Image (cartoon, helix red, strand yellow):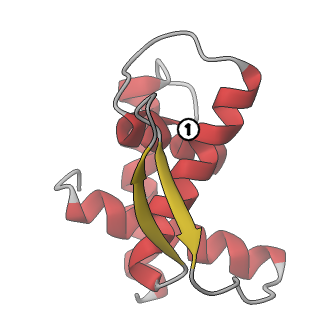
Amino acid sequence: MRTVELKKDWEKIETDFSIRFGGGEHMDVDAILFILGVQEVGQGHRTYKKNEKVDLIHVAICRVLEPYGYYTYEGTDEQGWPHYSVNEALPFLKAGEQALLIKEAIVTYCKENDWI
């Protein structure tokens, strides 16, 4: 994905999510991943425990990186939480490269779901 296009799409996602879910407050990557995790688990708005919040972010990371071949969806457990297996270890990336990959994956996910 071209950097200029990614930047534009990412800014749209940040703005849309901040307005829709953050009451206008800026939402960072982790907050957006949390929202995507809630979407994937499908339990909607409720109070989540700290460990569940971490799990929701993990679910979102697995889901958005699935099309890149890093994870495969295995199914859901009895509580309805999706589970993924690791296909390929993520390559060692510098912090900026890691942020770029996850933003690109989130943009791709949002486009697939017609959110942008």
Element carrying mark 1: helix
Which residue is painted at 40% across and 33% down in the image? 80
Query: How far across and down, in percent of the image, does residue 38 sit?
Result: 44, 33
Which residue is painted at 41% across and 64% down in the image? 73
Residue 51 shown left or right of residue 115 in the figure: right
Query: How far across and down, in percent of the image, does residue 60 sit?
Result: 51, 51
Q: Quadrant of the N terminus?
A: bottom left
- Going by the numbered disc 1, the residue's amino acid type is Phe
Total number of numbered labels? 1
Furthest toward the top, the residue is: 47
Residue 112 shown left or right of residue 82 in the figure: left
The front one of 17 and 70 is: 70
Residue 107 shown left or right of residue 92 in the figure: left
Query: How far across and down, in percent of the image, does residue 21 sit?
Result: 43, 25
Q: Quadrant of the C terminus?
A: bottom left
Kindly identify which residue carries mark 1.
Answer: 34
Which residue is painted at 48% across and 11% down in the image? 46
Furthest toward the left, the residue is: 114
Which residue is painted at 41% across and 36% down in the image? 41
